[in-house]
Image (cartoon, grey):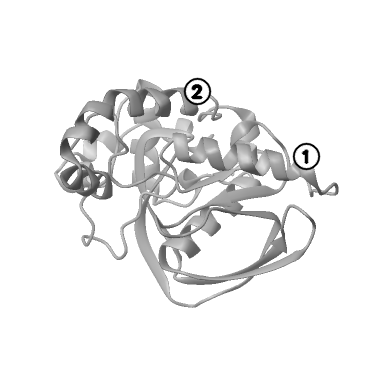
Amino acid sequence: MARGLPWRRPPGLRGHAANVESESVADESRHQDETEPEIAEEAPERLERRRLALAEVRQFGDPVLKSRASEVTDFGAELAGEAERMIALMHEAMGIGLAATQLGVMRRMLVFQAGPDAAPRALVNPELEWVSGDLVTAEEGCLSLPDVIVDVERPLHARLSGLDTEGRPMRLEASGLEARVLQHELDHLDGVLILDRTPRKQRRAAMRALREGGHFDPSMLERGGEEAAEAEPEAADAQRS
């Protein structure tokens, strides 16, 4: 497992495990095995590009991450250029989703690419029309919460509507990872973080890790690290929406 890459536990332990917004280490490691010499030589440069990209992403504690974005009213070339910039930054950060608010832009626009064979897309003024009753708990990470992974329960299927960058209507029927990514990014546009949706004990432990610049994932509690969740209740409660 390469240092500095997004971390997550191996899939299969809890539903459809997903490190939302960040490519999984499992996928990255598999890619390295297929192209070993070139990837090994390029890894430091690749990680440096990721570091520079993440420097442009607003991090936990920035008030913009707890603010609701405004509806987009102007469409056309400028908005399309902003979407392309977001997609490029998402790729450099090794992400699979990004909301405009994570860049400090208070517009309701998100970009996503939930698989290596999928085309990156932008969705403007997204609305959640329907979600299934089937709920799945999976691990999620976030480009704005470095080195933190928490469990989040979300509907397995979702239907969203919105507009493209030219103002044309769009409708998306999504399942699995794609549905999770879209719901995660829509949360960002409403000022909601994964810390607001995870169980209380994990939230406390994740808050402590963020304050101390450390790492947290749910397996740390399962290994008997419950003491990591003993951060002051007041500090955790202060972060709730």
Q: Residue at x 31, y 26 (%)?
A: 214
Q: Amino acid at mark 2?
A: Ala
As measured in the structure, the alpha-carbon distance from the residue carrying label 1 to the one carrying label 2 is: 23 Å
Secondary structure at badge 1 equals: helix
User: Residue 181, image x and y in percent?
Assistant: 49, 56
**Mark 1 or mark 2, earlier in chain:** 2
Q: Find residue 181 and name its label.
A: none
* Camera-nearest residue between 44 and 58: 44
Q: Which residue is denoted by mark 1 in the rendering?
A: 78
Q: Is residue 207 above or below residue 159?
A: above
In what quadrant of the picture does the C terminus appear? top right
User: Can residue 190 be seen in this snapshot?
Assistant: no
Q: Which residue is denoted by mark 2 in the rendering?
A: 55
* Camera-nearest residue between 20 and 77: 77
User: Residue 223, image x and y in percent?
Assistant: 14, 44
Answer with left or right where residue 214 lies relative to residue 97.
left
